[in-house]
Image: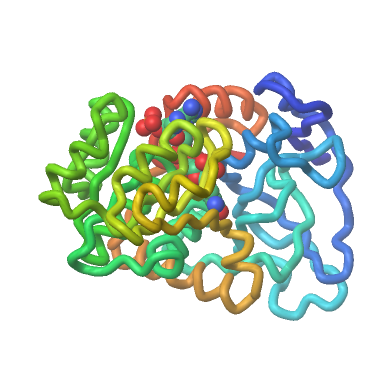
Amino acid sequence: MNHAIRVHEHGGPEKLIWEEVPLPDPKPGEVLVRHHAVGLNYIDVYFRTGLYKAPSMPVTVGMEGAGVVEAVGDGVTELKVGDRVAYAGALGAYAEARCAPADRLVKIPEGIDFTQAAAMMLQGMTAQFLVKRTYAVKAGDTILVHAAAGGVGSILVQWAKHLGATVIGVVSTPEKAQLITSLGADHALLTSENVPARVREITGGAMLPVVYDSVGKDTFTTSLDCLRPFGLMISYGNASGPVTTDLGVLAAKGSLYVTRPTLNTYTAKRDDLVATANDLFEVVKSGGVKIAVNQTFALKDAADAHRALESRKTTGSTVFTV
Ligand code: NDP
């Protein structure tokens, strides 16, 4: 018997339906993974609401999981039955078991358990490409991270500190401010403050080379106002809604750059996926970045997890037990 959370029509958390679904045989190039843990990510909300469109409906949402290979399709040579594996970016994760393309999976190294793996693959690999490739953070940089107590945010804060940067985090509550300070943030600002004015004060007027913004609509202009001329705005998410803006604003605010990166593009090639995952595993095993699983839910209670995430009640990573 196999159960999954499926969405038959877009809408609120109540549209996440726990139901019995067939257990498919792996097609060529696929493996059947029996999940031990599944990750919760904001992108799951976008697929539930319809902001992002699934190829067909009903859709099993979820992009991230960790478990054990139970069967292997034709042509799969790198994995065998019994391997501990994890992945991010393969739609269909909210299930007890699912088939996934073998070339999207990586083996979980010793010392990392299923819960940690499910918590870190998507948010951690995102943080990896953001601090290493979209903008290479280095000692001496001062950077700003929005939603700094969140899943990606709390990893970004730690990783940027590990690379020697001064980190300004922005969060909505004093409790979250305390949390990011404990993660190493040098300055914890509240969303209620005048963020560009505080950045001016902190940097002695120099402003920032880069801003990491996953909030989208509500923070776009604020983020641009924190940058110095030629600065880079990394708009990597839309928790408050998508950004729609006129490019002229980039000219007016100092010949700024904007990029809208996705993990998909950065890990499309197998070599990039493996290198990104290995870099993440190493920084976690070395203790340079700690993965905080601050909430767990049973997979059948996915609606409660979505409610918590959307009402900004979660911090760090959230994992479903299966
Ligand atoms: P988070 O744990 O960061 O949760 C979202 C946080 O955003 C909230 O806790 C809240 O923090 C903040 N927020 C600000 N405005 C709102 C709002 N209107 N509604 C809800 N939350 C709001 O989620 P994730 O770590 O899973 O994802 C963070 C972002 O990164 C998402 O936008 C996601 O889409 C994006 N992302 C992008 C990827 C890519 O490849 N481009 C890959 C992975 C994630 P606070 O209360 O402190 O303001």
- Of 231 and 115, which appears nearest the observer? 231
- Percent from the top left, x then y, of residue 147? 38, 38
- Percent from the top left, x then y, of residue 205? 15, 49
Q: How is the image coloured?
A: rainbow
- Placement of the N terminus among the 4 image quadrants: top right
Relative to 274, residue 121 above or below:
above
- Of 84 and 119, which appears nearest the observer? 119
Left/right of residue 51 with respect to residue 131 in the rendered view: right
Residue at x-position 49% and y-position 48% = 248
Residue at x-position 26% and y-position 69% = 138
- Percent from the top left, x then y, of residue 51? 69, 35
User: Can the viewer see residue 118?
Assistant: no
Q: Quadrant of residue 66?
A: bottom right
Left/right of residue 92 with respect to residue 240 in the rendered view: right
- Percent from the top left, x then y, of residue 127? 43, 57
Residue at x-position 59% and y-position 31% = 298
Relative to 122, residue 190 above or below:
above
Q: How many marks?
A: 0
Q: Quadrant of residue 287?
A: bottom left
User: Can the viewer see residue 252?
Assistant: yes
Relative to 130, residue 144 above or below:
above
Residue at x-position 88% and y-position 64% = 27
- Placement of the C terminus among the 4 image quadrants: top right
